[in-house]
Amino acid sequence: MNAIKLAVAGSLLAACAAAGAADFAMMETAERINQGTFKLSGFPVVIDRADADAERGFAVGLGYGLRYGMDVEGHVARYEEGTFTGADLEWNAWRRGPMALSIGSGLHGADLDGGGTLLGTGGTAIFSYSPLSRLTLSAALDAAYDDVNNRDNAPAGSRFPTDGQYERYYAVQGVGYRLTRNVELMGEAGFGLNGESDDYVSGGMSWYFR
């Protein structure tokens, strides 16, 4: 039975495709959304552009807890660059005491200001540790692949200046604190690991409800 569960979960993760870290900020830990519970999140994101002014945006997400340690989330984010949407499926693959490991994958897209569209996919692996009952520390590796088309009038200093394929890789550090049973405060910093990946910071709140 466990083998069947693993096969099904693996197939879903491969078929569903994670929202890009710097597009939405993951704002997640390996703490899964309980089955039958919704999660509503909102947070600003600031992207540190190496060759341009910092880009600011705001992202919201709505998630739902599924069976077998899985949850699904949809995201919308608005930046000076354009409007991004995405969805991801996360699976809590391992848990032992205060430690947990989750993996996820997702699809995302964007309608870019100045013309052009973006379609992408990504994946993430998240490790978390809870030294206290209300406190969770997390570290993640995130990778995203983006295909940009019809980009004819990109603004100066754009993240996606021309048509083509972009690969982005991040090391992400996060902290979460359960303010109440249903409210969690979170902060996150992502560090780009290649030239196409800009650093970012984000902080916000998640509300869990049925």
Image (cartoon, rainbow, N blue to C red):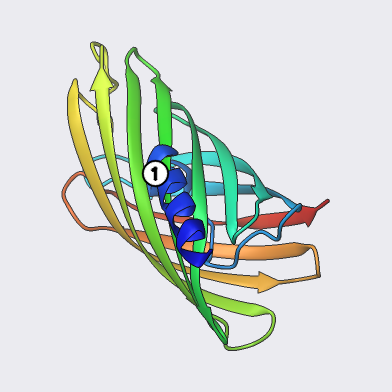
Residue 209 spot, x, y in % from top left: 81, 53
State the count of labels. 1
Q: Secondary structure at mark 1?
A: loop
Residue ID at (48%, 44%): 24
* Amino acid type, callout 1: Gly
Residue ID at (60%, 59%): 68
Work out whether 138 lies above or below 33: below
Seen as rendered, the residue at the extreme front is: 1
Where is mark 1, residue-wise? 20
Which sits in the foreground, 47 or 112? 112
Q: Residues within 10 Å of mark 1 (few under 14, many from 20)?
A: many
Residue ID at (25%, 27%): 147
Work out whether 148 lies above or below 192: above
Residue 55 spot, x, y in % from top left: 40, 40
Residue 53 spot, x, y in % from top left: 33, 41
Within the image, what quadrant is residue 160 found in? top left
Which sits in the foreground, 167 or 42? 167
The reply to whether residue 131 is visible in this rendering is yes
Residue 75 spot, x, y in % from top left: 56, 38
Residue ID at (57%, 38%): 74
The reply to whether residue 18 is visible in this rendering is no
Work out whether 126 lies above or below 134: above
